[in-house]
């Protein structure tokens, strides 16, 4: 949390709005999300604080940030969405993770799906990984996150795709470990 706040403080570049948003109550934070002309850092700060407070008014802004091209914004949004507890989160993360046009930005939605352990998690991770196992696919980090997430989830539906992932040098160790968890019946081992 402190890393996110420090990054946003630096982006605010001395703006007094930063201090106001840090001290604002949930209603003021929510109002700032719908105010026109706000810089991105202020919207992120308001959404992040609301998300960590469990205020569902942060859901839509956080999902937009989860799909942002800046990995730091995606990571902060994923942290807040994991805490938020909104039942729509897993569906939104699954939609972002499986969107073939946004694969370059799917790392944090994939990690969020694994952390949520929702019914949507395994099918979305399997579908995403299956697509990324194509030869010379450039998104190996997203594929590795899928493999690690599937291994942590320990669901037998992932067996086939994890076996195929073993043939990829960058995925082999994690895929073998995930298969070991499946065989042992200990998803968190």
Image (tube, rainbow, N blue to C red):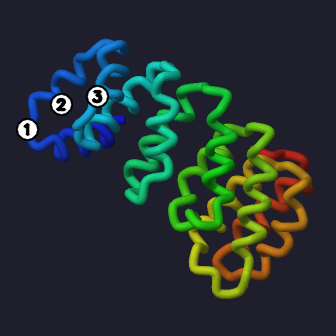
Q: Is residue 64 above or below residue 34?
A: below
Front residue of 33 and 104: 33
| Label 1–label 3 contact, CB within 8 A | no
| Label 1–label 2 contact, CB within 8 A | yes
* Residue at the spot 39% in from the left edge and 32% down from the top edge: 48
Left or right placement of residue 142 versus residue 5 in this view: right
* Residue extending farthest bottom: 136
Q: Residues within 10 Å of mark 3 (few under 14, many from 20)?
A: few
Q: Secondary structure at mark 2?
A: helix
| Label 2–label 3 contact, CB within 8 A | no
Q: Which residue is mark 1?
A: 14
Expressed as whole percent of the image width and height from the top left, the position of residue 152 reads 73, 49
Q: Can you see residue 189?
A: no
Expressed as whole percent of the image width and height from the top left, the position of residue 188 reads 75, 44
Q: Can you tell which quarter of the image residue 65 is in?
A: top left
Q: In terms of sequence position, does the residue under pointer 2 or pointer 3 come before the other?
A: 2
Expressed as whole percent of the image width and height from the top left, the position of residue 175 reads 76, 67
Q: Secondary structure at mark 3?
A: loop
Q: Is residue 179 above or below residue 85?
A: below
On the rendered image, what quadrant is the N terminus found in?
A: top left
Task: For marks 2 and 3, give the one nearer the viewer.
Answer: 3
Q: Looking at the rendered structure, which numbered label has been put on residue 35?
A: 3
Q: Can you tell which quarter of the image residue 118 is in?
A: top right
Q: Looking at the rendered structure, which numbered label has been put on residue 139?
A: none
Q: Which residue is mark 2?
A: 18
Q: Is residue 9 above or below residue 149?
A: above
Q: In terms of sequence position, does the residue under pointer 1 or pointer 3 come before the other?
A: 1
Q: Residues within 10 Å of mark 1 (few under 14, many from 20)?
A: few
Expressed as whole percent of the image width and height from the top left, the position of residue 146 reads 68, 60
Left or right placement of residue 142 versus residue 11 in this view: right
């Amino acid at each position: 949390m402190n890393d996110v706040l420090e990054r946003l403080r630096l982006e605010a570049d001395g703006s007094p709005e930063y201090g106001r948003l840090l001290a604002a109550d949930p209603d003021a934070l929510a109002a700032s999300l719908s105010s026109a002309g706000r810089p991105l850092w202020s919207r992120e700060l308001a959404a992040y604080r609301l998300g960590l407070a469990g205020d569902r008014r942060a859901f839509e802004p956080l999902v937009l940030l989860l799909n942002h091209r800046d990995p730091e914004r995606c990571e902060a949004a994923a942290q807040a969405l994991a805490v938020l507890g909104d039942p729509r989160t897993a569906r939104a993360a699954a939609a972002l993770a499986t969107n073939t046009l946004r694969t370059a930005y799917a790392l944090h939605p994939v990690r969020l799906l694994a952390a949520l352990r929702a019914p949507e998690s395994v099918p979305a991770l399997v579908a995403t990984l299956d697509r990324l196992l194509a030869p010379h696919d450039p998104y190996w980090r997203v594929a590795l996150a899928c493999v690690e997430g599937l291994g942590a989830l320990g669901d037998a539906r992932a067996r086939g795709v994890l076996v195929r992932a073993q043939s990829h040098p960058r995925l082999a160790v994690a895929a073998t470990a995930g298969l070991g968890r499946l065989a042992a019946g200990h998803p968190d081992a």
